[in-house]
Image (cartoon, rainbow, N blue to C red):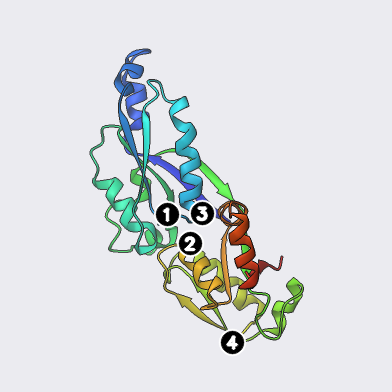
Amino acid sequence: MTRKILLAAALLALAAMFPQGAEAQFYKGKTITMIVNYPAGGPTDLEGRIVGLHLPNHIPGNPTIVVKNVGGAGGIIGSNQLGEASPNGETIGFFTLDIPGQVMGNSSMKTKYSDFVLVAGVESPLVVYMRKDTPPGLNSAADLMKTRDFKALSLNVQNTNTLNQALALDLLGIKYHAVPAYRGLKEVETAILQNIGQLANSSLSGWAGSVERLSSGYRRAARTRRRPRPTS
């Protein structure tokens, strides 16, 4: 299960500080920057932009929300940037959290997630998908057990995306080559389409959104290139 978490440096504190009406005047005509800690086009970005589209309607003063993608280091660069922002209520973040990084004391994490103010959380189910043309060929989820030595693509080594994937495949006793080398899940999906790798996982909402919003022309091209489909 992946978690996308909406965080704010001081948004809730400001809401408690101002009397009714004054808060609306504070945000009226202002722009709030929402940092998304993964590249554009991936699940975190898609979900963050949906939240950013509707969030102004729930903030007194109806401010403008501008999404800023800051990917890299398994999301830590983006969370660090939020930690360095002025705590004035004008910078928030929509993050997929690198919990293992904080637990293991990643030295590159300048601000712990526990130091942010939590506003809300969004959960998305995880989907594992694989190319149907992976030898000897897949027609059902059970056919995964017949494969071996394929490439499983993911984010950095300690990221929850990588750990979830490795744990599942290791428990099944499947032989594979792990490639934890990508900045975002959109890059992973592109690599799967190019047959650079054969298996990956993603949050279901982001994966489905990137498929369903394709133009009809791209759908035909994708079928020609044997676009991977989920086996379960």
Q: Nearer the viewer, mark 4 or mark 1?
A: 1
Q: Which residue is mark 2?
A: 186
Closer to the chain start, of discs 4 and 1, is 1
Disc assigned to residue 136: none
Vertical position of residue 17 compared to residue 172: above or below: above
Are the two marked residues, 4 and 3, in contact with CB atoms closer than 8 angstroms?
A: no
Are the two marked residues, 2 and 3, in contact with CB atoms closer than 8 angstroms?
A: no
Q: Nearer the viewer, mark 3 or mark 1?
A: 1
Q: Residue 11, position in %: x, y?
A: 35, 31
Give, as a three-letter code, the residue at label 1: Ala
Closer to the chain start, of discs 2 and 3, is 3
Are the two marked residues, 1 and 2, in contact with CB atoms closer than 8 angstroms?
A: yes
Give, as a three-letter code, the residue at label 3: Pro
Are the two marked residues, 3 and 1, in contact with CB atoms closer than 8 angstroms?
A: no
Mark 3, other Cα within 10 Å: few <14 / some 14–19 / many ≥20: many
Q: Residue 201, position in %: x, y?
A: 57, 65
Q: Residue 145, position in %: x, y?
A: 71, 81
Give, as a three-letter code, the residue at label 2: Lys
Q: Residue 209, position in %: x, y?
A: 58, 51
Q: Which residue is mark 1?
A: 40
